[in-house]
Every structure is written in structure tokens, then in C-alpha cells.
Image (spheres, rainbow, N blue to C red):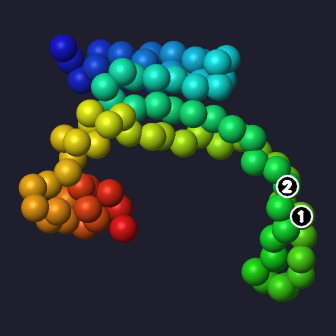
Amino acid sequence: MSRPRAAECVEALLHLMQEAIRREGRLLFSGFGLFDSYAKGPRRGRNPATGGELTLLGRRVVVFRTSPKLRALLVCPGGAPGPRGGPGGDAA
């Protein structure tokens, strides 16, 4: 497969994933993990330039949770740090 064709396929897959998450609120890849979206409410924040308080608007966020099968594959024997420094490959 050519590089442009591969890029086109990846873009099509990402578009389908976005639509599924937007429509269903979640997307499960069995044996890999779950993309889940949820609404975060408004919260207090601070303007770093002035120090003044402000209210940040609510928004939707997407989180990814690994499946137990994938998590088991990422854990290094003996509890050694994973490739990204944390246990089992998780970022610290």
C-alpha cells in the first residue's frame, strides 16, 4: 500500500471513530480498550496574566481506558519500569 493511500485509510478510520464517539458517547475495541466521553461542568480558574478569577466553561472530554488484556501485555516482568518510565509503560 502506498503512503498516501495508507494516510487516507487512517484518516477514514479516525473519522469513523470520531463519529461513533460523538453518536454513542463511547467506542470499544475489544481486547484493546475503551474510548469514553463525558461532560465536565464549569469550574473556577485563574487568568495567569492578571491573577483574576474567572469561570471556565463546561466541555466534553474523551478518555481512553486500556483493556485488561492490553494492560497485561504492557506490564514488564518483575515490576520493572515500562518504556515510558512508569510501571507497565504508563507515563509517570
Which residue type carries mark 1? Thr
The relative height of residue 91 versus residue 11 in the rendered view (above or below) is below
Residue 65: give x, y in percent of width and height.
Answer: 45, 40
Image quadrant in which you'd find residue 83? bottom left
Q: Is residue 70 visible?
A: yes
In depth, the one of 35 and 22 nearer the eye is 35
Residue drawn 38% across the image and 39% down it? 66
Q: Secondary structure at mark 1?
A: strand
Q: Quadrant of residue 4?
A: top left
- The mark found on residue 42 in the picture is 2
Residue displayed at 21% across by 47% down: 74
Residue lying at the far left in this picture: please name it.
Answer: 77
Q: Are dots 2 and 1 in contact, CB under 8 Å? A: yes
Alpha carbon separation for disc pair 2 and 1: 7 Å
Q: Nearer the viewer, residue 12 or 87?
A: 87
Q: Amino acid at mark 2?
A: Pro
Neighbour tally class for label 2: few under 14, some 14-19, many 20 plus, Cα within 10 Å: few
Q: Earlier in the sequence, mark 2 or mark 1?
A: 2
Nearest to the observer: residue 74 or residue 59: 74
Residue that badge 1 annotates:
55
Identify whether 38 is placed above or below 15. below
Q: Estimate the x, y position of residue 51 in percent, counting from the top left.
A: 83, 85
Give the quarter of the figure containing the N terminus.
top left
- The residue at 28%/20% (across/down) is 6
Query: How far across and down, in percent of the image, does residue 84 sit?
Result: 25, 61
- In x, y percent, where is residue 44? 85, 68
Side (left or right) of 14 relative to 91:
right
Q: Which mark is residue 78?
A: none
The quadrant holding residue 12 is: top left
Vertical arrangement, residue 21 with respect to residue 70, above or below: above
Q: State the residue at coordinates (64%, 25%).
A: 25
- Secondary structure of the residue carrying numbered label 2: loop
